[in-house]
Image: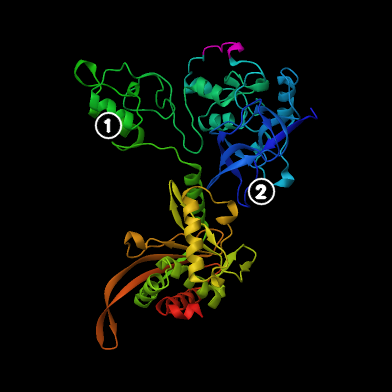
Amino acid sequence: MSNLHALTVPKWGMSMEEGEIAEWQVAVGDQLAVGDAVVDIETSKIVNTAESTCAGTLVRQVAQPGEVHKVAMLLGVVAEGVVAEGEITEAEIDAFVAAFAPDAAALNISLVADAAEPEKPAPQPSYGESPAKKATPAAAPAAQPQSALSQGPDDTDVKASTVARRIAKAHNINLNNITPTGRHGRVSKQDIEQAAGIRVQAAPLVRQGAGQAISATVSPLAGRSTVDDSRIAATPVARRMATKMNINLNDVTPTGRRNRVTKDDVEKAAIALTGVADYREEKLSSMRKTIAARLTESKQTVPHYRVSVDIEIDSLLQQRKYMNDALGHSISVNDFIIKASASALHAVPDVNVQFTGESILKFDQADISVAVAIDGGLITPVIRNAGNKSLPEISAAAKDLATRAKNGQLTVDEFQGGTFSISNLGMYGVDQFDAIINLPQAAILAVAAGKKQSVVKGDRIVPATVMRVSLSSDHRAIDGSVAALFLKALKGFLENPASMLL
């Protein structure tokens, strides 16, 4: 097997631990050169394309679209040179896959237990063999009741894929009761689903399925039917509603005339499944899962506190108008905020920090992460060394990063490694909001809309454009007085924009 080589999940960025397989760019039998695009992998923020690290012929696609694999795990197998039909047997490839072990030294993360035994896809046709030559699989066994599957001796030593074992544990299924059909006699995810009558999608979103027609009270294990419901009698409105809400009509108890499913019947079934009458279900993307996990971690582990200040921006707006109209630039209010934040970080460097648990990291350079809304979530591209950039340079960099972020064209180093974040919702007209700290950073600035208000100047009440900003800080690293000093400096720069151009 010395002429077989592994294609593995690359590590893009220090925080990457896993990726979801999106689409293969090559097929089994294709010739590869070093650097050829092989497979698209969706990480927490972007879709990257893994490249071939060796030359030869692709003889096995191990990772399949929709599966999530950890860094350094096996994607596929490449044989050296041009491989003729029958030159390399499936048994040789199987042995190579079974013997594969990830290179732990290449990781900056701890490999979890399931990394040693990745989920294998269903057997594929032999290399060079037509799928039509494969034997017709046996009919799937009928689903067994949960009680019949939960009893039995200790199943620790039963061979099973990691995913199958996780599903079995979640549904209290003893693996001794499952007939294995996976490679090398292992219990596969499909074996669990067929035996228990469940259908599980990519974690962590779990949807159940399979089984016969049930009443509006749906048990978690019985779940949702996957049987064709096109012959179920239903009103047109009920069928449209069921399609919209992803409800199988086999799971609805009909109460209409001539035993037809009505709109009310579908609503009752929806309430039984989700607790609400009208809903649509969308699978969480890798980005949304990561956003949820990171924000939960930040909110739960970081002692947030917030300090706010109102800033008059009429001078800033006049300066912006002059630079854009007279000098031909295209500078936004947010560009001024980025520049002012970098200037304030240089003036109050104790905010430009990160808390590690054992120490506080202090940064001399202000690398500003700017939140950009994209389809399915948001991303924070970084404007490096913003303090040493001019307003036109910041404007050009921000526009370029935002455009490529929305097109999914950022590289990992362009949205990781910032030292401070800005989230601006002013364009939506909000008066004030609080932002959650973008770990591992220690502070984030929330920027609201600039609105005309009456303010007191001396003994007079005059109109002014006022913008409220709120600084969320990690109290483990930044004291309240330091946060107040930062906002004071920021206010000075924004109310007197010429001062940050010196």
Farthest residue to the left: give it: 257
Of the residues shown, which amino acid type is indicated by label 1?
Glu
Q: Camera-side residue: 250 or 147?
A: 250
Local crowd at mark 2 within 10 Å, few (<14), some, or many (≥20)? few
Q: Which residue is at 57% across, 40% downward?
A: 41
Q: Spatial distance from mark 2 to mark 1, Cα to Cα?
A: 46 Å
Q: Camera-side residue: 331 or 185?
A: 331
Residue on which disc 1 sits: 267
Residue 159 in the image, given as x and y percentages of width and height? 66, 25
Secondary element under disc 1, as helix, strand or loop, is helix
The numbered disc on residue 306 is none
Compared across the picture, whether 171 is left or right of 111 comes to left
Whether 411 is drawn above or below 155: the answer is below
Residue on which disc 2 sits: 109
Q: Secondary structure of the magenta portion, mostly?
A: loop
Residue 446 in the image, given as x and y percentages of width and height? 42, 64
Residue 412 in the image, given as x and y percentages of width and height? 58, 52
Of the residues shown, which amino acid type is indicated by label 2?
Ile
Local crowd at mark 1 within 10 Å, few (<14), some, or many (≥20)? many
Farthest residue to the right: give it: 2
Determine if the magenta segment contains residue 133: yes
Magenta range: 132-139
Whether 298 is drawn above or below 101: the answer is below
Farthest residue to the bottom: give it: 459
Residue 273 in the image, given as x and y percentages of width and height? 35, 32
Q: Camera-side residue: 181 or 90?
A: 90
Q: Camera-side residue: 180 or 375?
A: 375
Q: Which residue is at 54% across, 60% downward?
A: 382
User: Is residue 474 at all visible to an observer of this figure?
Assistant: no
User: Is residue 168 at all visible to an observer of this figure?
Assistant: yes
Q: Which residue is at 49% across, 78% downward?
A: 501
Question: Which circle's residue, 2 or 1, is located before the other in the chain?
Answer: 2
